[in-house]
Structures are given as structure tokens and as C-alpha cells.
Image (cartoon, coloured by chain):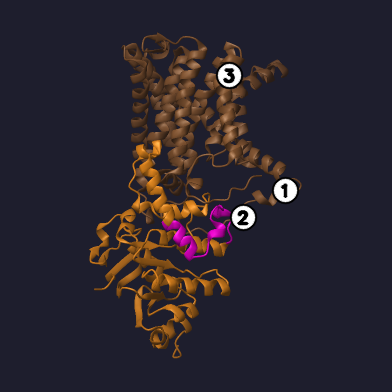
């Protein structure tokens, strides 16, 4: 069974159709890339999946569960975490605290218990911190653990966002431009990490990305969007060879 | 400067993991405990007022500093706490039940206000809370049967288990115990998941939501905790005032609490304490200033409000991190002398933020 199924999704802002009848499905354990020119509707699809936007028509199912029936904060319970295109971190908190917020969906303690900080709360806290440490090690971020996010350079922030999403222990990760703004070295690191995430943690990844080198290196399958519609689906090479895709990026020879 | 080599999660979790810090706090608590022995009973009363302001300021800090919501009407909760406590005491309810009940009532009203305003932001929320405070003040003034209206209400004396606690030092210890309990509880909350959720809501609602934080609930709970602490402060304050009237809990008082939080340093418990020092010292300073100024200026109405507003504006422009932030910089300067560099505290340019989905 497919991990994520999107069927006939349609969403418009005012008179503009941002996504028009888009369908695709993501298989377990694969890295699925979504490419397309600016304004094609890539991030809108992500925002629809994470329930920030509600589509007018269509269905989104994750492991058989209807996502449209869930409220935004309930999506992560199912095992679906995301990052944001322009980085949405908790600026005035440390890296460690940012990652611990990533555990929010798994918190069981009550306000009253936390006010008194009962031994039970402390035990829970140990368990969460253990998980966070694993992620810190995986992404090689121990050096930054106590720094405030607002003091970090851009590349490190990108990693914190990825790490925070991983702390939710997702089964599927939505990455909105994981490599945008990174230098070539950082992009290479990112590609290794994404490989690790896929292979070691067994997480399915859906990513929007403009860097075609990264897409070519990582993606098992790829979908090209243009003006809110699917232009092509297939391996990266197939999509790159597609005539409509080439026309959308380069303009058609006939015109 | 002591660097802690961490070998256990407890060192991240525990309060005061650094030895120097532990020593400083213990010294401060010891000094607070010994104060009535050391100083004149008039000043013990002043110190009690200072403690009550710490508590009220902590309440507002939960909202402004920790969860990023504004309230221009926190005096309302001070008023609700004070009146509820006094009325209950007047009905013969014992102190130990009446005080928590008053705090709970303030908390519930706060939660209702939080529920109503949980979808508002910035300006709109400021205006809503301000309007709320005016409504509460009016109700306190008009509901004559219960509150005594503008004539005011006499506060029954503080008695616990039949023991009359009329002396300033007795009241001081009761207040100190409540304040220490609340500081401890709040510090616990801030090192636990709920504290981090509040900070998440403050810094980015969008991503907090995507990580599973129920924003509306966190906001309502933050309003509850905030109003409860301020209500508790109101109940205690009533005893120090002996006589309460609606005007005591007007907009001016809200401004004072706001001043405390901003001048003290937004976002830290210590900030609220620094702010309380400032707010308690300020009236004395203003009185002193009046003597120095020419009479035409000194007698001008609104001099106090003008100074309050001016000071808030100056702090926001020149030291957004407040007195506590200044203090931290000073300490780092001494600890790292001569290697201190100003750049340590210069904020990085902010990067683009995703268009907020508000």
C-alpha cells in the first residue's frame, strides 16, 4: 500500500487555481522529489498535506487515514513531520529546546504534574532527551546544543529544522527546499544525511527542491509541476527528458 | 566563569546546576528570610509589597514573556483576586481556602478571556484586554451589593487557624512562602514540556502547530496560569492595602505591571524580579523628583503616567532585554575582562520568515 496518496487535489486562492486536480502517490521508503518553476504549487501541496490550507476538492490519505479529517496539530501524531521553506524555528530558544519541542506529540504529562515536576515528569524527560541526543549525533550537531537559534548561521539553522522534524519520529518527512541557501559543501552534507535518514531510519521522504544535482543524486522518483498541474512523473531522467517539462523551464522551441 | 562538564541529563534539567548560581539564590532566599530581623517594620511592609509585585509581574510574564501574548489589562485580575478574596473572607471563609479560591476564580476568568482572544494577535489583543480591564473596573464599581462600589471595601484581617496575623512581619512570611512556591512552580513549568510549548507558540505558531502543539489550548492554559498568579497577588495585596476600591485596579496599575515586565527583561523569571525592584523604587524616585522640580511642573497632573510611558519607550528602544539583560552583559564583561566584545550581544540580521499563516 502506498504511504501517501493524494487524489484530485484542487485548491485556489481567490480566482487563481494554485493546485488543479493533482494526484500522486508515494511508496514506503522512497525519496520522492517534487520540482517545478516558482509558483507551480509545490509548497501549497505541502501546506495542504500538513493541513495549514484546506483544499476545495480531493483527498489526502496517509497510511490509509484520511488527513483532511485531522486538525493541523494532529497530523504529526500519525507520523508526518515537515520543515519549512524559509525556516520557522523558535528563535529565542536553544537548539536543544527546539528539538525537544519536536517531541510535543508524544508528551503525556499534565500541567499540574509539570508544575510540581513529579518524578514521573523527570522520567519522561529523560526518555525525550535520549531520543533528541540520538538525532543530535546523527546530524553532527552536538557543538550547537546550547546555542540560541538566533545566533546560528543559516546553514546550521537548516539542520536544526531537519533535526527538529526528525525528533517527532516521523514515518514520512516533508522537506520544503532542504538545500536552498546552502553552499555546495553543506548541500553535500545534506544529501548524505537524507540518505542516512532514508536508509538507517527507514523514513520516507517527500521533498520540494530546485537543486537538480541533489534531486538526481537522491530521488527515487520525481514529479514535475507547472501552473498547479502535474507535467510529468517518473525517474529523474525521465522527467528531465519530458518535452513539457523542458518547455516550462526553457520555453518551447516552437514559440 | 565556571563551565559545567555535563555527564547526566539531570544537569540540563535541574534548577541551578551551576554552583555559583546555587549559592547566589540561596543567599538571596536566606536574606529574604532574615529580613524582618534586620530591618524596621515599616520597611518590612514595603518589602511585602515588593514581593506581591513580583508575583503579579510573574503572572504577566507568563503571558508576555513566555507565550508571546499581550495583555494591557492585567490589573483586572489583580482586582478580581483582591475582591474575591476579601468578599469570601467577609463571608467567614477561612484564609487558606479563600485565597486559592480567589486565585482560581481569576484563573478561570483569565481562561475565558484567553478563549475569546485566542485567535487575535498584536494590536487587537491589546485592545481587547484593555477593554476587558475597563469592564472589570466598572463592574467592581457598580456591583455595590457585593463590592461596596466606589466607597471601597474593608479587607478582613489575615487569620490562619485562628491565629491573627496582623503584624507586618507575620504577613511578610505568609507572602514570602506563597511567592517562593510560585517561583518554584513556574520555574518547573518552564523546564518541562509545557514551558517549551509556550515558548514555541511565542516564537512560531506555524511550526509549533506542525509539531503537534495545540495552539489554542496552550494559549488558554497560559492565560489561566497567568491570571491565577496575578489573582493570587491581588488577594495578598488586599491585606497590605487594608482598604480596596475599584480605582486601585485601574488602567494605571496595568501600565505599572507592563512597565515591570519590559523594564525587568522580557522572557525570564529573574526579569520579573528586577522589574519589581524598579517599580517599587520608582514612586520614591518620583516623589523625590517632585521636590526638585519647579512647582508648576511638579504639580502637573499625569507626571507619573508620563514618566511610566517614557521609561517603557526608552527601554524598548535602547535595551529591549531590560535590566536583567543589562546585568547579564555587565557580568559577562567582568568575567571575560579584557576580552569582552560587544558583538556577543549584537543580534544577527533576521532571515526571511515564511509568510505567516495567521
Nearer the N terminus, badge 1 or badge 3? 3
Q: Quadrant of residue B144?
A: top left
From the viewer's side, name the closer residue of B37 and A36. B37
Q: Which chain is orange?
A: A
Instruction: Please check whether the numbered discs 1 and 3 fall on a single chain.
Output: yes
In the image, residue B312 above or below residue B96: below
Please provide the residue range marked out in magenta. A131-153
Q: CA distance from mark 1 to mark 3?
A: 36 Å
Q: Which residue is mark 1?
A: B340
Left or right: A250, with B223 as reference point: right
Furthest residue in direction front, as rendered: B7
x, y percent for residue B203: 48, 49
Q: Which residue is mark 2?
A: B348
Q: Is residue A147 magenta?
A: yes
In the image, residue B47 above or below residue A7: above
Q: Residue at x 50, y 17 (%)?
A: B172
Q: Secondary structure at mark 1?
A: loop
Amino acid at each position: 500500500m502506498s504511504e501517501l496518496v493524494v487524489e484530485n487535489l484542487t485548491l485556489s486562492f481567490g480566482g487563481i487555481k494554485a493546485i488543479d486536480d493533482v494526484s500522486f502517490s508515494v511508496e514506503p521508503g522512497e525519496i520522492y522529489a517534487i520540482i517545478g518553476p516558482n509558483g507551480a504549487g509545490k509548497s501549497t501541496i505541502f501546506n495542504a498535506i500538513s493541513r495549514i490550507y484546506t483544499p476545495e476538492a480531493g483527498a489526502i490519505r496517509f497510511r490509509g487515514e484520511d488527513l483532511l479529517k485531522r486538525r493541523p496539530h494532529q497530523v504529526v501524531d500519525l507520523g508526518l513531520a515537515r520543515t519549512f521553506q524559509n525556516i520557522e524555528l523558535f528563535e529565542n530558544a536553544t537548539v536543544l529546546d527546539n528539538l525537544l519541542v519536536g517531541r510535543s506529540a508524544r508528551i503525556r504529562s499534565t500541567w499540574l504534574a509539570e508544575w510540581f515536576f513529579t518524578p514521573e515528569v523527570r522520567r519522561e524527560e529523560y526518555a525525550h532527551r535520549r531520543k533528541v541526543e540520538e538525532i543530535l549525533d546523527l546530524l553532527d550537531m552536538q557543538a550547537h546544543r546550547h546555542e540560541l537559534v538566533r545566533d546560528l548561521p543559516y546553514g546550521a539553522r537548516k539542520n536544526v529544522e531537519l533535526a527538529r522534524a526528525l525528533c517527532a519520529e516521523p514515518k514520512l518527512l516533508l522537506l520544503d527546499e532542504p538545500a536552498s541557501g546552502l553552499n555546495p559543501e553543506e548541500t553535500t552534507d545534506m544529501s548524505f544525511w537524507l540518505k542516512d535518514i532514508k536508509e538507517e531510519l527507514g523514513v520516507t521522504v517527500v521533498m520540494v527542491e530546485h537543486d537538480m544535482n541533489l534531486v538526481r543524486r537522491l530521488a527515487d522518483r520525481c514529479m514535475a509541476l507547472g501552473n498547479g498541474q502535474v507535467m510529468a512523473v517518473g525517474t529523474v531522467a525521465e522527467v528531465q527528458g519530458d518535452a513539457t517539462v523542458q518547455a516550462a523551464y526553457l520555453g518551447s522551441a516552437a514559440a | 566563569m565556571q563551565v559545567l562538564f555535563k555527564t547526566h541529563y539531570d544537569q540540563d534539567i535541574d534548577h541551578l546546576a551551576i554552583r555559583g548560581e546555587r549559592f547566589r539564590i540561596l543567599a538571596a532566599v536566606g536574606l529574604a528570610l532574615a529580613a524582618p530581623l534586620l530591618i524596621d517594620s515599616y520597611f518590612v511592609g514595603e518589602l511585602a509589597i515588593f514581593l506581591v509585585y513580583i508575583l503579579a509581574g510573574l503572572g504577566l510574564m507568563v503571558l508576555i514573556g513566555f507565550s508571546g501574548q499581550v495583555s494591557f489589562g492585567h490589573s483586572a485580575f489583580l482586582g478580581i483576586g483582591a475582591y474575591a478574596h476579601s468578599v469570601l473572607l467577609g463571608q467567614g471563609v477561612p484564609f487558606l481556602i479563600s485565597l486559592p479560591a480567589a486565585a482560581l476564580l481569576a484563573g478561570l476568568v483569565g481562561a475565558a478571556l484567553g478563549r475569546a482572544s485566542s485567535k487575535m494577535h498584536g494590536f487587537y489583543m491589546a485592545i481587547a484586554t484593555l477593554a476587558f480591564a475597563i469592564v472589570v473596573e466598572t463592574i467592581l464599581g457598580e456591583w455595590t451589593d457585593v463590592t461596596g462600589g466606589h466607597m471601597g471595601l474593608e479587607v478582613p484581617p489575615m487569620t490562619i487557624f485562628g491565629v491573627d496575623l496582623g503584624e507586618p512581619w507575620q504577613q511578610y512570611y505568609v507572602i514570602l512562602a506563597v511567592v517562593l512556591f510560585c517561583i518554584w512552580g513556574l520555574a518547573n513549568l518552564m523546564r518541562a514540556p509545557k514551558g517549551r510549548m509556550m515558548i514555541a507558540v511565542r516564537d512560531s505558531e506555524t511550526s509549533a502547530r506542525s509539531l503537534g502543539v495545540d495552539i489554542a489550548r496552550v494559549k488558554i492554559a497560559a492565560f489561566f496560569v497567568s491570571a491565577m498568579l496575578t489573582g493570587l497577588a491581588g488577594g495578598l495585596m488586599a491585606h497590605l492595602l487594608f482598604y480596596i476600591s475599584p480605582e486601585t485596579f485601574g488602567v494605571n496599575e496595568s501600565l505599572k505591571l507592563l512597565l515591570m515586565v519590559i523594564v525587568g527583561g522580557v522572557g525570564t523569571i529573574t526579569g520579573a524580579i528586577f522589574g519589581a525592584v524598579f517599580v517599587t523604587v520608582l514612586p520614591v524616585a518620583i516623589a523625590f523628583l517632585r521636590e526638585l522640580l519647579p512647582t508648576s511642573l511638579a504639580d502637573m497632573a499625569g507626571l507619573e503616567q508620563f514618566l511610566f510611558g517614557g521609561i517603557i519607550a526608552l527601554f524598548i528602544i535602547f535595551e529591549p532585554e531590560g535590566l536583567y539583560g543589562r546585568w547579564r552583559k555587565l557580568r559577562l564583561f567582568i568575567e571575560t575582562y579584557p576580552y569582552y566584545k560587544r558583538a556577543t550581544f549584537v543580534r544577527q540580521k533576521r532571515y526571511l520568515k515564511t509568510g505567516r499563516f495567521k
